Image: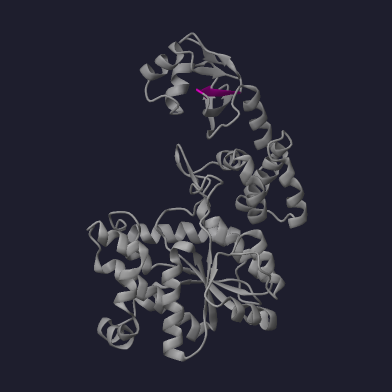
Amino acid sequence: MSRSRFRSDTLNNLNDRGFLYQITDAESLDNLVCSSAHEIVFYIGCDPTAPSLHVGHLLWIKLVNELQKSGLKPIIVIGGATGKIGDPTWKDQQRAMLELEVIKSNISAVVSKLHTLLKFGDTGNAAILLNNDDWISKLNYMDFLREYGPSFSVNKMLALDSISARLERQQHLSFLEFSYMLIQAYDFLYLFENYGCKVQLGGADQWANMIFGVDLIRKRTGKLAYGVSTPLLTNSHGLKMGKTESGAVWLDENLTSVFEFWQYWRNVDDADVPKFLKLFSDMSLDEINEYEGLIGTAAINDMKILLADSVTSFVHPTADLQSIKATASSLFRDGCSDCTQMIDTFVFKRDTKICNVLHETKLAASLTAAKRLIDGRGVRVDGAVIEDYETSITDDCIISVGRKKFTKISVVDS
């Protein structure tokens, strides 16, 4: 959004930190927040499409935290119903249909992580956790069509960029994907009527779906509701955040190790540091703005570490940051300034052959591959190049393959 000022300190802070992208009726919402922030209930939905939340989810999670600090009450809706369908995307194919057991497993994993990131409870403005399958599954299909079908314009749906682009390319677009918009709009109406929820949050890619919900509430009740979108999380080059050479950056430490997660933020571009500090740290805006002058200087590295510490301690509250930074410092001395893959610590018996270690830690696909790496001088132990297949591991160490794959080895006698 532009830097025009709101009357509400809450919205001004969110806007200045970069959380806000679009609001359906900004002036009206501003007045509402000014007059009754502690009475406002808002919601955001999260479909269980993967076994973990990822970096892209952090933006709305931090936004929910900020709104809670201002007294607003959040509802987090897990898309047990919408996750069975999937919304239309820019891709040529519809989202893969997940098995019901996979959806159930994903929900369990996502909910478990959310409980470490957000404040849930039954009192005050603690967050409420709901599953939209609890009310969507009870709908009668014909009754739903008769009751709500007339409120939706197919013309508007066809005009959506994500849909029109697919149609122009003559790519298959299923009725299921159209149904997603109706269900999400009904979610908003259901929460409006049953929980007094007046605001829906969502990413910029959900803007059209939010508008359908706002319109449905207006048509059915004659009352105002609001949609608020966040920008997509991108870096200074316009690329979507959360991807590395080895895949997505997950919030589950079993999928992305805590070290890898910390290192991901430690290695962001200099130009992105102030932006991400505004979004993901509790530093004041004045303090962050002072650091913008450090871009391009060696001092920006201290800010990158502060950023990595802040995000990592939020996502992984029990993380040993001192140990992580000590390991990172050791790797840096060994020639890795941008380590992006850190495998967790492995335990081996003393005098295990290096080729076996490489194979069993998956740093090499096979014993033969391990020997090829050694022949190519691509294997180091604590920074020293290994040249002999018969080398044994005798002490705790860090093994590196190339410049981006590292693992810690702990040695035991039996």
Q: Position of residue 212 (x, y in %)?
A: 41, 76
Query: Which stretch is magenta?
Result: 397-402
Q: Would you say residue 350 sits in the magenta stretch? A: no
Q: Position of residue 47 (x, y in %)?
A: 42, 63
**Which is nearer the eye, 246 or 121?**
246
Quadrant of the snapshot with the C terminus:
top right
In the image, farthest residue toward the bottom: 222
In the displayed structure, 132 sits above or below 31; it is: above
Quick check: can you spot residue 148? yes
**Is 34 on the left or on the right of 392, as rendered?**
right
**Which is nearer the eye, 102 or 21?**
21
Q: Would you say residue 400 sits in the magenta stretch? A: yes
Q: Position of residue 267 (x, y in %)?
A: 60, 38
Residue at 72% across / 39% down in the picture? 302
Figure disc tally: 0
Residue at 31% across / 64% down in the picture? 163
**Is 16 on the left or on the right of 358, as rendered?**
right
**Which is nearer the eye, 150 or 264?**
150
Residue at 53% across / 68% down in the picture? 22
**Which is nearer the eye, 169 or 242?**
169
Residue 120's quadrant in the figure? bottom right
Principal SS element in the magenta part? Answer: strand
Quadrant of the snapshot with the N terminus:
bottom right
Residue 104's quadrant in the figure? bottom left
